Image (spheres, rainbow, N blue to C red):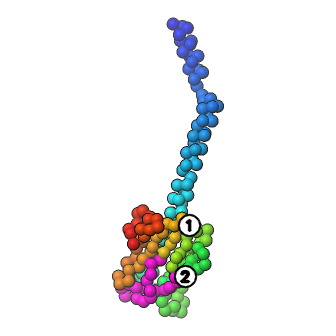
């Protein structure tokens, strides 16, 4: 019995710890799993950048509409798609009264790689109803480098603002179809 207890204690003492080969195999398996996961993380980051840009524009359009209602004064929204991935959307007082300031401006930045595929235009939210008063209301189209696309649309008669995803080329989940 004593020999058996000594033998068992010896086996347990030797079984503690990890061999170098086990450690190397574990590291190789983790490296393979990480290399498989990186492309999906890059796509996820690109989608998040696109969503962030679309939601910033959506938020500024909502801001312009609410400011028009709050002030009972028309607010002008100006869209300026510049060269490449650089673009700006600004909200200003429609009459540019003395002392009026630009309440809000959002710009895309070239390092985000989100392109605006829309011509420049401006329109006015009415201070009486918060509806678009004048100007052309095309949808604002934002495109990521991989072709993910989101549209920010202002409904012509009611002023409802929404973000939607076209069914092609690549549909963004979580947004209604345009």
Residue visible at 53% across and 75% down in the picture = 116
Q: Is residue 105 visible?
A: no
Residue depth check, mark 2 versus mark 1: number of the one nearer the observer? 1
Q: Nearer the viewer, residue 142 or 91?
A: 142
Note whether 177 is above or below 67 in the view shown: above
Q: Horizontally, is 32 left or right of 135 in the view?
A: right
Residue visible at 45% across and 73% down in the picture = 151
Residue visible at 44% across and 74% down in the picture = 152
Q: Nearer the viewer, residue 3 or 23?
A: 23
Reading the image, the residue beneath label 2 is: 80
Secondary element under disc 1, as helix, strand or loop, is loop
Q: Horizontally, is 91 left or right of 72 in the view?
A: right
| Residue range of the region highlighted in magenta in the rendering | 119-140
Residue visible at 58% across and 48% down in the picture = 35
Q: Quadrant of residue 70?
A: bottom left
Q: Nearer the viewer, residue 170 or 56?
A: 170
Reading the image, the residue beneath label 1 is: 145
Disc 1: CA contacts within 10 A as few (<14), some (14-19) or many (>=20): few
Q: CA distance from mark 2 to mark 1?
A: 20 Å
Q: Is residue 146 visible?
A: yes
Q: Earlier in the sequence, mark 2 or mark 1?
A: 2
Secondary element under disc 2, as helix, strand or loop, is strand
- Where residue 2 appears, x then y in whole percent? 54, 7
**Does residue 122 belong to the magenta stretch?**
yes
Q: Horizontally, is 139 left or right of 111 in the view?
A: left
Note whether 31 is above or below 61 in the view shown: above
- Where residue 5 appears, x then y in whole percent? 53, 12
Count up the numbered dots: 2
């Amino acid at each position: 019995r004593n020999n058996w207890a000594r033998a068992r204690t010896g086996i347990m003492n030797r079984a503690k710890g990890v061999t170098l080969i086990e450690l190397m195999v574990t590291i190789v398996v983790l490296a393979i799993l990480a290399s498989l996961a990186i492309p999906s993380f890059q796509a996820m980051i690109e989608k998040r950048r696109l969503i962030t840009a679309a939601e910033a524009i959506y938020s500024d359009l909502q801001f312009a509409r609410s400011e028009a209602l709050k002030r009972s004064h028309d607010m002008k929204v100006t869209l300026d798609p510049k060269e490449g991935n650089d673009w700006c959307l600004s909200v200003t007082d429609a009459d540019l009264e003395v002392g009026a300031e630009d309440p809000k401006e959002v710009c895309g930045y070239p390092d985000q790689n989100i392109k605006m595929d829309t011509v420049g235009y401006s329109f006015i939210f009415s201070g009486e109803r918060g509806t678009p008063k004048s100007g052309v209301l095309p949808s604002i189209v934002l495109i990521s480098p991989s072709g993910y696309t989101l549209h920010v649309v202002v409904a012509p008669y009611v002023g409802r603002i929404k973000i939607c995803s076209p069914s092609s080329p690549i549909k963004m989940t979580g947004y209604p179809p345009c």
